[in-house]
Image (tube, rainbow, N blue to C red):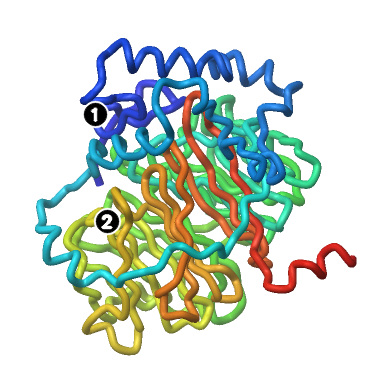
Amino acid sequence: MAQFQNQELEYMINDEYYDMTDFADTSVEHTNRFNRSCAADSMDSDFEDDFEQSKPKTDTSAEEARNGKDIQGIPWERLNFTRDKYRETRLRQYKNYENLLHSREDLEKECKQVDEGHTLYDFQYNTRLVKPTVVHFQLRNLLWATSKHDLYLMQNYSVMHWSSLLRRSKEVVNVATPVLPTLKYPGSFSRSLSRVQVSTMAVKDDLIVAGGFHGELICKYLNKPGVSFATKIATDEAAITNSVDISYNSSGSMRIMTANNDALIRVFDANNFSCTDRFSFPWSVNDTSVSPDGKLLAVLGDSTECLLADAQSGKEINKMKGHLDYSFASAWHPNGHIVATGNQDTTCRLWDIRKVSESLVVLKGRMGAIRSIRFSADGRHMAMAEPADFVHIYDTESNYESGQEIDVFGEIGGISFSPDAEALFVGISDRTYGSVLEFNRRHHNRYLDSVF
């Protein structure tokens, strides 16, 4: 993956790759007017973090959206251009980051034609009381829902809990101050850490695991005080922890797998946090995910090929060939037969692991790489997020031919379905309009909701 040393934590996306207000066909003064108008509406974000806590009017409800309010609260009526005009300019000027040059013409022919005019999830609420942040432009798994009302996200140096029911946030872990592990085990390499720039995160069964920009690993059980385990797993300063995955092995024991730039996947026992294995690969590993039965491992990295490996031994089982650039996202369908991979070639490919000679379906984003992929727990829907502006939801039972496009403005820090598949959360990382959007699953018999 590309290496960029970050000089500040808040809003670290380099303007070289994406600038929300960089219009080539408008004057500098026009751009400045846009910035001033946005700032007048929500004030400077540094000040807003403190002041807006007492101003829930910055949030947007479903009722307000139905009455014409922009779901992000952007005051288009006060600007000198319309939302449609701004979208048109963004689509024209956005530069997708690519490591490898490739022809898009042939790629287009492979992609499935999808009717994205459906509404699978209805907009429910948008809050600007929490603001997801991103530390590396290629890593976007920083948002995890543990229920329909409970969400965990990264905001600057804090792991935050957001309750959509109470409309309240709470700091869970502060990684700016020294992180002192509370548990010590024989043979454990646990150590104190400070000022960790969290690059990736996973939450499962009361366990939060966070990976750092300089190879750190932090583990905390939500039902226990303090941080249980912290260490630096990679000695190379450039060995970013790109991905973390929490799963169960065939014997039912919980394990943690980390993917790093040093071309290693490390396996940790979640009970005592000992490193039980290391799997080596020929390139930097950008993402890894374990199949539902705990037996297979999807391995993606600085290669056009994606690998299937044995989760116990790390031995390569098969190659999935078709992508044209490096991959950074994967997810397994609950049935365990389908794995989805997201790539900088702007596509998501779905593979049947019983026959990986060719991909089952190729889905294409609107303008950028596919940085995050999630399946709902019931397998009915799949969501994929681009680096900015677009999240796509697909009906898997229609063979991915029908779907929904969520169209917003800003870098996307992560997406997450709730475990019951009833909610979908989208994190927007932006100086002014950083927020969390909540969508609720649409049911055909919604009128029954009013009965209960």
Asked which quadrant contains residue 444, the reply is: bottom right
In the displayed structure, 295 sits above or below 449; it is: below
Asked which quadrant contains residue 349, the reply is: bottom left
Q: Amino acid at mark 1?
A: Glu
Q: Looking at the picture, how far across and down is residue 261, in whole percent?
A: 29, 49
Residue designated by label 1 = 16
- In this rendering, does residue 227 appear at all? no
Residue closest to the eye, 39 or 191 = 39
Q: Earlier in the sequence, mark 2 or mark 1?
A: 1
Q: Is residue 426 left or right of residue 319?
A: right
Q: Looking at the picture, how far across and down is residue 202, in whole percent?
A: 54, 53
Residue designated by label 2 = 346
* Circle 1 Cα neighbour tier, 10 Å, few/some/many (<14 / 14–19 / ≥20): few
The CA span between labels 2 and 1 is 19 Å
Q: Looking at the picture, how far across and down is residue 236, in whole percent?
A: 29, 40
In the displayed structure, 180 sits above or below 324; it is: above
Which residue is drawn at the image coordinates 54% and 81% (left, top)?
250
* Secondary structure beneath label 1: loop
In the displayed structure, 263 sits above or below 72; it is: below
Q: Amino acid at mark 2?
A: Thr
